[in-house]
Amino acid sequence: MANIASPYSTYSDTTPQKRIISDVITMISPYDTPFLDIIGGLDGGSGKFKFIGKGKMVEWLEDTLTPLSGTFSLAANETVGNVVTLTVADGNMLQPGHILLTDNKEMLWVSAVTPSTGVIIVTRAFGTSSASILTTAAFSVVGMARLEGDDSDSIGFTDISTNYNYTQIFHKEIKVTETERVIDNYGFSDAYQYQAAKSMPEMMRLIELSILNGYRTAGSATTPRAMGGYRTFITSNTLSGASMTQATFENAIKLIYADGGSGKYTAICSPTNMQKIKNFYDSSSFLRVDRTETTVGMRINGIITPFGEVDLVMDRWISDSYIPILDLNNIGMVTLRPFAVEELAKTGDAMKTELVGEFTLAIKANESHALLSGVS
């Protein structure tokens, strides 16, 4: 042993000094799941969709009312005149008595329909002036006027359609040696229990990310099946969010309203997009403060628009490129197998278990949601 010069100090011989270590382990890794939470958790869709039975593919039924808009299918443009025989792309949507409004603001009264060919006989300029009709011009059904005493006429009907998603398996193995389980550690008394406690937040994070990024895949013996995320289903009311303004954001909600949506919506926003939306309203046009105030700004949790109220939910996991606007009545997760810890066969000097569960996402009534993409 070395002979150390006096004085003996904390710097002279550090070997016998005790380590001062906290008995608490700090972890700041994020594990929140705002999207999953707001749609009702891991089985929030079961009550909304009322699925019967269990399987690896879930399907739901959807229907619509008879359409009120269509297009002509003419061999040539019809000039202003008394042409009364026209052709439409879908004759099944019309019946005698319908009043049509062309894109040139001429009203037509339908007196006869041949559904198989789309040929209709009309009275031109029904209460309006006559106007030209282009070959594929759009029209709207704006009313019904039947002849007194007329016989009944048939009209087509809309098919009930289905949509679907696949269940996805989430798994993590937890394996800790028996020696590690009995030695003393700072921060925990049992290494297995400590690692097991971390596993559930890790799995919930992965489900959140699958909702945000998933692509629907049927799978095979060599390829896992996967659930489609929200972008798989929100395809009708899509709008570019490039150089997004307050009007752009509200126009997305207007699209839902135009398709029949109503009520309260929820927009899932990244932190960056939450700032953008906040800045639309956090201005002198909306906010007044007294001279004595020392805190300025607004925390915006919701917006009232002419087309419905929108709650704002910030999600650190969602891409800055997208803002989904959701009707929460029509979206939810479905559980096939709830998370369970299963003990695995012992193959060595270690304790080994697996955490496994199987879930999917269901989104119905595509037109009750909207999606801003390419947000900038």
Image (tube, grey):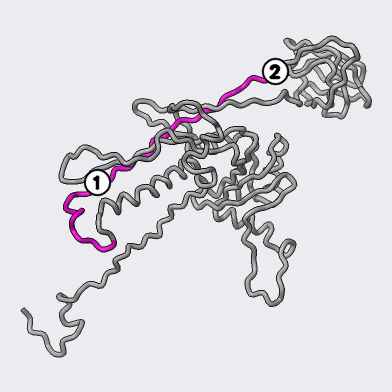
Image quadrant assignment for residue 338 = top left
The residue sitting at 57% across, 45% down in the picture is 322
Q: Amino acid at mark 2?
A: Phe
Can the viewer see residue 215 in this picture?
A: no
Q: Which residue is mark 2?
A: 157
- The relative height of residue 6 versus residue 315 in the rendered view (above or below) is below
Image point (34%, 28%), residue name: 222
Coordinates of residue 106 in the picture (x, y in percent): 88, 26
**Stretch in magenta:** 158-187
Give the SS element for disc 1: strand
Q: Give the side of residue 199 with respect to residue 10, left or right.
A: right
Dot 1, crowdedness within 10 Å: few (<14), some or many (≥20)?
A: some
Q: Nearer the viewer, residue 215 or 306?
A: 306
Q: Amino acid at mark 1?
A: Lys
* Residue at the extreme bottom of the image, as rendered: 6
Residue 291 on the magenta span: no
For image coordinates 44% across by 42% down, the residue present is 207
Residues at circles 2 and 1 in contact by the CB criterion of under 8 Å: no
Give the labeled residue for mark 1.
175
